[in-house]
Image (cartoon, rainbow, N blue to C red):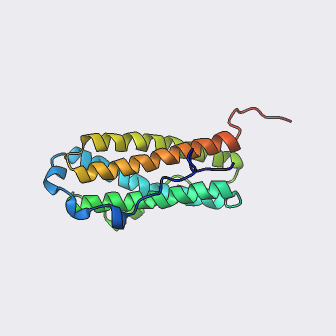
Amino acid sequence: MDNPAGMDGRWGGGWSLATEIDWGAIDIAAARTDPELLMLVRRAALRAARRTVGLSHLLAALAADSVASALLARELHDSWKHFHALRSYLEVAEYSPAIAEAELEQHRRASPEGVLKRAEDAAARIAQLLDDAARDGALFGLVSSRATDPALARLADRIARDRQQHSLALAKFLAVNVDLSGEKTA
């Protein structure tokens, strides 16, 4: 596979928590007007952190495949970035309950994904990642459209774009590298 990133050959440039999020521009009053939305943001943060466990197992299992490793390393990096961005947003917005380290560890330990033993397991996990990325893209589109705080809307848009890029790259990888037809030859 020549290019796992996407159709234009790039990952979209990425974005930085430190330089591209104006943490001082968060409208705390606006953020607090929709506690249900903040609860969705909190849950999404914990899912991103939990996803890193399964990604690390998958990355270890596919370390010999340079394309898969690149895709999974980017997914792992972005999952942590998304977690930290969402957690930081919730902290600035003074959302309660805050995500404590003990809760974070509990969620990561609860990840059902263990060590992979067969190639079919890796393909199934990548397909699950594809589904998760598509679902997250839709969720963050909803968060963006519903957010009364423009800073949250921008953050959700960035994450939605990342998740869409992951979804497209994973779909392309599966289409090119994995036979999902179920047909077996002798």
Residue at the limit of the structure toward the right, as seen here: 186
Q: Position of residue 9 (x, y in %)?
A: 58, 50
Q: Position of residue 175 (x, y in %)?
A: 65, 39
In the picture provided, is 19 more to the left or to the right than 9? left
The image quadrant where one finds the C terminus is top right
Instruction: Give the residue drawn at x 30%, y 44%.
Output: 144
In the picture provided, is 33 more to the left or to the right than 124? left
Viewer-proximal residue, 67 or 120? 67
Q: Position of residue 148 (x, y in %)?
A: 20, 46
**Residue 172 seen in this snapshot:** yes
Residue at the limit of the structure toward the left, as seen here: 29
Residue at the limit of the structure toward the front, as seen here: 8
Instruction: Give the residue drawn at x 71%, y 60%.
Output: 64
Q: Quadrant of residue 173?
A: top right
**Residue 110 seen in this snapshot:** no
Q: Position of residue 77 (x, y in %)?
A: 49, 61
Instruction: Give the residue drawn at x 64%, y 42%.
Output: 174
Viewer-proximal residue, 88 or 23? 23
Q: Quadrant of residue 138?
A: top left
Instruction: Give the residue drawn at x 71%, y 33%.
Output: 182
- The total number of labels drawn is 0
